Amino acid sequence: MARREDNRRNREEEPEFVDKLVHINRVAKTVKGGRNMSFAALVVVGDEKGRVGFGKGKAREVPEAIRKATEVAKKSMMRVPLREGRTLHHDGKGRHGAGKVILRAAPPGTGVIAGGPMR
């Protein structure tokens, strides 16, 4: 009986995914009686083995928005093939509006070279 409880504790202590909060945005809807405030969260989730997903959530409270975004991110997971289990096979570029992202393969020992949201 004690072994089962120990195994459960070990599983609970080791999270399956690593999640990062990228951005929190306070949004307001103007109604007749004033402004209704809510929060939008952007979360990225990964297992550090080649699976990654992102999600957006919106709620009246910040923790609830983060929870919703994390659930959406876990449901939208996709596989990214890695070389040697640590880097990309090919360079990639992406654009959305005025934002640009360039992902490049790197030699061993190179850390993340990026600004705040990408880090």
Image (tube, rainbow, N blue to C red):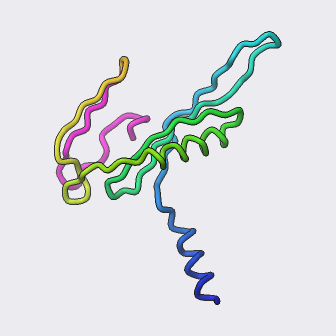
For the N terminus, give its image quadrant: bottom right
Foreground of the two, 92 or 31: 31
Q: Is residue 102 above or below residue 82?
A: above
Q: Position of residue 102 (x, y in %)?
A: 26, 33
The answer to whether residue 105 is magenta is: yes
Per the rendered image, the range of residues in magenta is 99-119
Q: Position of residue 53 (x, y in %)?
A: 42, 45
Foreground of the two, 14 or 106: 14
For the C terminus, give its image quadrant: top left
Q: Is residue 55 left or right of residue 9?
A: left
Dominant secondary structure of the magenta stretch? loop
Q: Position of residue 72 (x, y in %)?
A: 52, 43
Q: Is residue 98 left or right of residue 2?
A: left
View extreme (right): residue: 33
Residue in view at x 55 percent, y 68 percent? 13
Q: Is residue 45 above or below residue 47?
A: above
The mark total stands at 0
The answer to whether residue 56 is magenta is: no
Foreground of the two, 65 or 72: 72
